[in-house]
Image: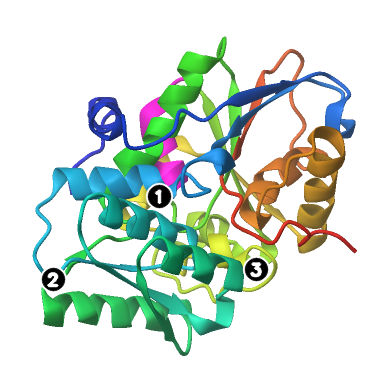
Amino acid sequence: MKQLTSADITAAADRIAGHIRLTPVLQLESGALGLHYPVTLKLEHTQVTGSFKVRGAFNNLLSRDVPDAGIVAASGGNHGAAVAYAATKLGHKSVVFVPRAIAKEEKLRRMRDFGAEVILTEGSVADCMAEYAAHAETTGALSVHPYDTAPTLAGQGTVALEMEKQTDGFDTIMVATGGGGLIGGIAAGIGDRVRVVSVETEGTNTLARSLKEGSEIDVAASGISAGSLGGPRLGELSYTIIKERVTDAIVLPDVAVFDAAKKLWEGTRLVGEPGAATALAALTSGAYKPGKDERIAVLVCGGNAEPHWFMD
């Protein structure tokens, strides 16, 4: 299996420049969000499709040949929206398979608005992945996997390089984990000099289970973050990188995610989707306690949710 290098991620950053937004960072003072230390937020939910996924989507389409049959993807929403946007912008057609069990109307609407044909599937996330793979096989469409190809990981990893250039540096970054494409790309890019912490919910604990049981598992996603963090297993490339460079795997209950989202809104007037709040919840719940003078960053990875989802 090809190893992913920092050079691959730098090349991806050059490739996708001009197709994505330079998203801002927000430096929060000590005391914000009820925390007694400052925190840097990377506001990737302000990205052009509302999440980091557009980075991997463009890197895939710009580094591979796209056939006349177009592009096919499987997604709970963010990856599908990103692929649809990138495909439409580059003049290709796209089809996205979505598990009906975790489909959210807000994310379905965005995929369609960006130009995708959306096909809802029955059964588990794994069943959806099988249908998407079969479509690619029978039609010849280019398969853009949400988290298990080098172009996807390299594209996602560009967010960390971008963040380093926008700040004075950070020691630790909190990253919500689904199938591992985001955290794998970040760990490959900066994991040799920054502590990369995985954060999941009890219903989407794919990475934590994989580190204990091995990669050959099948997690049935459930709970508030299932729509964005519901990968049934880690990608093979991601798993290899994560074993080497990610040592912290925090798992939280859904209630901590709701609380983090409320604190984010109350303290900054920002709304993230459940996946984004999951990363922040590692801090607001007290599950991760920084050391003295440890510089903490949180990736606010997406905002594709109804704005009132965390309200009572």
Q: Which residue is mark 2?
A: 69
Q: Position of residue 121 (x, y in %)?
A: 43, 86
Callout 1: SS: helix
Asked if residue 187 can be seen in this view, the reply is no
> Mark 1 highlights which residue?
181
Question: Which region is colored magenta?
Answer: 182-193
- Give the mark toward the camera: 1 or 2: 2
Q: Is residue 249 visible?
A: yes
Compared to residue 53, the image places residue 75 above or below, namely: below
Amino acid at circle 3: Gly
The dot on residue 203 is 3
Residue drawn at x 34%, y 57% is 83
Is residue 190 within the magenta segment?
A: yes
290, 308: nearer the viewer: 308
Q: Amino acid at mark 1?
A: Gly
The amino acid marked with disc number 2 is: Ala
Q: Are marks 3 and 2 in contact (CB under 8 Å)?
A: no
Query: Reading the chain from its start, which is encountered first: label 3 or label 2?
Result: 2
